[in-house]
Image (spheres, rainbow, N blue to C red):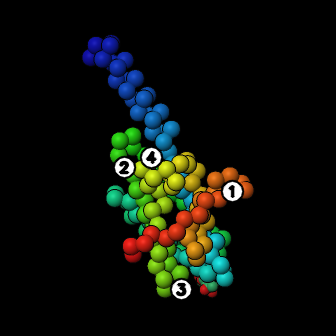
Amino acid sequence: MSQITQRIILLCVLMLLSVHKMLAIHVNIINSLEDNLNLTVHCKSADNDLGVHVLHHRENFGWSFGVGVFKGTLFYCGFTWNGQLHWFNIFKKTDKETSDCTECEWHIFKSGPCRTLTSSTTSCFPWNKNK
Ligand SMILES: *[C@@H]1O[C@H](CO)[C@@H](O)[C@H](O)[C@H]1NC(C)=O
């Protein structure tokens, strides 16, 4: 291998590593349901099923992932309490309102999920309409 080829390969590897690092996302979901209800969370993407997790009041469930530069990334979650199931797209790369974060913190209320923007502000969303 010529030296120039080696340098180009090294440069590509470094670029890939830095892109991956820049776009590492952490999502955290906190059970903030009223009445101390338990919350069952089941999140998935096209390639990953994160499994079923039961959160007691105030408990959290989180995971990390890398977002590809060209690939659309979507994680959607089912939230169940009192036998009612609701869905929400918790991270959708093409949707600025859910993907404008690297530390994405969500509080789950009966009325819908709220994302923490700063220590004192949150942005709340309705559940998905189609079940
Ligand atoms: C939540 O689940 C625990 C068991 O894991 C149970 O003891 C508790 O009563 C449940 N809370 C409610 C509000 O149903």
Q: Quadrant of the N terminus?
A: top left
How many residues crowd around disc 3 within 10 Å: few (fewer than 14), some, or many (20 or more)? few
Residue extending farthest to the right is 120
Ligand 1: which quarter? bottom right
Q: Secondary structure at mark 1?
A: loop
Q: Please report whichever mark, 1 or 4, sits nearer to the chain's N-terminal start.
A: 4
Q: Secondary structure at mark 4?
A: strand
**Separation (CA) of disc 2 from disc 3:** 33 Å
How many numbered discs sit on the rendered protein? 4
Q: Quadrant of the C terminus?
A: bottom left
Q: Residue at x 61, y 81 (%)?
A: 37
Tag 2 residue: 72
Say whether residue 2 is left or right of residue 112. left
Tag 1 residue: 121
Residue 61 position, x and y percent, is 56, 64
How many residues crowd around disc 4 within 10 Å: few (fewer than 14), some, or many (20 or more)? some
Under mark 1, the amino acid is: Thr
Q: Nearer the viewer, mark 2 or mark 1?
A: 1
Tag 3 residue: 82
**Separation (CA) of disc 2 from disc 4:** 11 Å
Tag 4 residue: 66
Under mark 3, the amino acid is: Asn
Say whether residue 3 is left or right of residue 52. left
Residue 3 position, x and y percent, is 33, 12
Q: Residue at x 35, y 46 (%)?
A: 71
Under mark 2, the amino acid is: Gly
Q: Secondary structure at mark 3?
A: loop
Q: Please report whichever mark, 2 or 3, sits nearer to the chain's N-terminal start.
A: 2
